[in-house]
Amino acid sequence: MKTESLEIPKIQFDENGALLIVASEYSSKDDFDFFQGKSIIKNKKLKQRFANCTEWIEFTSTQEMYKILNGIGNIDNFLATFDGEPFEGMTVRLFNPKTKLWSIYWADSTSGTLDKPVVGSFENKVGHFFSKDIFEGKNVLQVFRWDARDENNPVWSQAMSDDNGKTWEWNWYMYMSKTK
């Protein structure tokens, strides 16, 4: 069950170039229930993006997630150490019951700002969440993938495209193991 072999859904744009994101019919506020609690994470992060880099940085981290807002949201804390310095990230995920779409927001201890969300939904225990973004002054598309087919060992991954989704570069994988 390799997450790397899953295809990224085709990107659709409206007449103004905005991303068109439609929820799967199975999308629900319970999509992230598999992630509740604590996890140990093996991270594999590309050293340099959009540079034909093949060198990966590997490190461990921990994460704890809990539900909020009567179950239509959740928050997690991500703890790691980079170059001997503590690092903390935080994700806020919100489910819109009307659109059945999730919005995922990230903030961390280096920037102190809440990033614009990636938006999407799950189908068959795999979620894809997209946004337009800017990376090093370049317009990019970004996708987060949550592969929860093995609920005790989910995989999160991130890719970016600088050609409107024709090609994607995977730049971060998190292999999670639930702890008690």
Image (cartoon, rainbow, N blue to C red):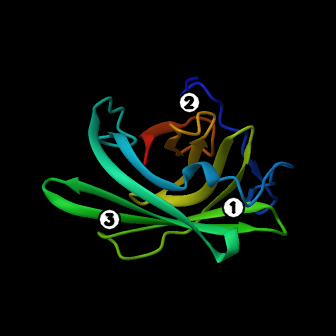
Q: Which residue is mark 3?
A: 88
7 and 161: which is toward the camera? 7
Q: Residue at x 64, y 68 (%)?
A: 73
Position of 117 relative to 144 (above/below):
below
The tag on residue 3 is: 2
144 and 14: which is toward the camera? 144
Q: Characterize the local packing of mark 1: few (<14), some (14-19) or many (20 or more) Cα atoms within 10 angstroms.
A: many
Disc 1 residue type (three-letter): Trp
Q: Give the secondary structure at mark 1.
A: strand
- Specify which label sits upstream in the sequence, 2 or 3: 2
Position of 69 relative to 161 (above/below):
below
- Specify which label sits upstream in the sequence, 1 or 2: 2
User: Farthest residue toward the front?
Assistant: 180
Q: Position of residue 66 (x, y in %)?
A: 53, 64
Q: Position of residue 1 (x, y in %)?
A: 58, 23
Q: Residue at x 54, y 28 (%)?
A: 4
Q: Which residue is mark 1?
A: 102
Q: Residue at x 49, y 56 (%)?
A: 37
| Residue 18 visible at all | no
Disc 2 residue type (three-letter): Thr
Q: Residue at x 76, y 55 (%)?
A: 21
Q: Position of residue 86 (x, y in %)?
A: 21, 62
Q: Give the secondary structure at mark 2.
A: loop
- Where residue 132 sits, quadrant-wise, is bottom right
Disc 3 residue type (three-letter): Glu
Q: Cβ–Cβ below 8 Å for labels 1 and 2? A: no
160 relative position to 44: left or right: right
- Specify which label sits upstream in the sequence, 1 or 3: 3
14 and 156: which is toward the camera? 156
Q: Cβ–Cβ below 8 Å for labels 1 and 3? A: no
